[in-house]
Amino acid sequence: MTTRFLSLICAMAALPSAAAAQRPARLTVLADSVSPGERVRVAVAVDHGPGQSAVFPDVPAGSAETAPLVSFGDAEAFSVTRLPPVVRGSIRTDSAVYEVAVFAVDTARVGPIPVRLAVGRDTVSAASGVVVLPVRSLIRGGDTTPAPLGPPDDFPGLLPVWLALGALALVLAGVGAWLFLRWKRRARPALPRTEPFPEATAALDALPESPTERALGAREALRVYLARRLGLPALESTTDEIDAALAHDARVPSDARDATRRVLALADLVAYAGIAPSPARADEAATEARTAVGAVEAHLLEAERAAAASVPAPPPASAPPPSALRPPPSAS
């Protein structure tokens, strides 16, 4: 009789603990709505009797970057904070706060959170309930109905491409023609150049009728002849420099020097002073230029003939030596 009474007393003492063990965990979302990806806090609490301990799901550190997330329905947990227990008589309340985010449309189900109560080596489930949250749309205001398809965009025309290709072809053709003409000019054999005296007389014969151009042409023909025949820098020298060079050159007669000075002096007045010569004066300059060229050429030819005459002629190669013409001595 005594044994049965003690068993009844233990059973009655254990009733509050057993009832607390079967009570589900309370789930509270600290927000009335949520946007996709927005982080909110979710609190879970469980009441149990003495001698029991609550075990909440753990969230590994860095789970958002390296490990799979802990999911509670449509919510994904990023961290958890365990709160100190609260004791009220024989009831102890354990709680934890999770930081979660939802990625759902329209509504999101948060929970259940699997909480377990450990009694010695045994565990009892005390999972939480489920909270349904409205999900706010990220599109603000206006009509969200997609617009109807419009006409396709115009494909760009090929006219700019063809113009660019045409310009490129013209450039390549021009470069090719320039290279061909340059090669042909180099490959063309050089024509033999006319001797200085015939070239000078031909230029003087072809002088224009204009007095100004006739005087300048006579100067140009005379300077080219002096440069080619005597080797003087007559094309880039002034009138005074040419006159000084002719004065020290024994190959130039005095009359040729005087005629040259008069032709160059008249041409300087025409070229630099803007004086227009009379037709008679232009004809006189042409005649004096011809006289100077003829006098220098005649003097040089005479000097060349004299130099050639003063050189003794070599004996013929086939002529026998004088000793070979003597008769052999007679034998005595």
Image (tube, helix red, strand yellow):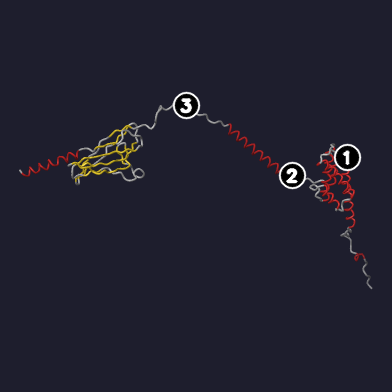
**Residue 95 visible in image:** yes
Closer to the chain start, of discs 1 and 2, is 2
Question: CA separation, marks 3 and 2?
Answer: 68 Å
Q: The C terminus lies in which quarter of the figure?
A: bottom right
Residue shown at the point (80%, 49%) measured from the top left:
233
At mark 3, the secondary structure is: loop
Location of mark 3 (residue) = 150
* Tag 1 and tag 3, C-beta contact below 8 Å: no
Type of amino acid under label 1: Arg
Out of 198 and 3, give the one closest to the viewer.
Answer: 3
Type of amino acid under label 2: Arg
Location of mark 2 (residue) = 188
Question: CA separation, marks 1 and 2?
Answer: 43 Å
Q: Mark 2: few, some, or many residues within 10 Å (few <14, many ≥20)? A: few
Question: CA separation, marks 1 and 3?
Answer: 90 Å
Q: Which mark is residue 281?
A: 1
Closer to the chain start, of discs 1 and 3, is 3
Question: Along the horizontal axis of the image, is 11 left or right of 220?
Answer: left
Closer to the chain start, of discs 3 and 2, is 3
Picture coordinates of residue 277 (x, y %)? 86, 38
Q: Mark 3: few, some, or many residues within 10 Å (few <14, many ≥20)? A: few
Question: Along the horizontal axis of the image, is 313 left or right of 51?
Answer: right
Type of amino acid under label 3: Gly
Out of 32 and 192, give the one closest to the viewer.
Answer: 32
Rendered image quadrant of residue 27: top left
Q: Which mark is residue 182?
A: none
Viewer-side label of 1, 3: 1
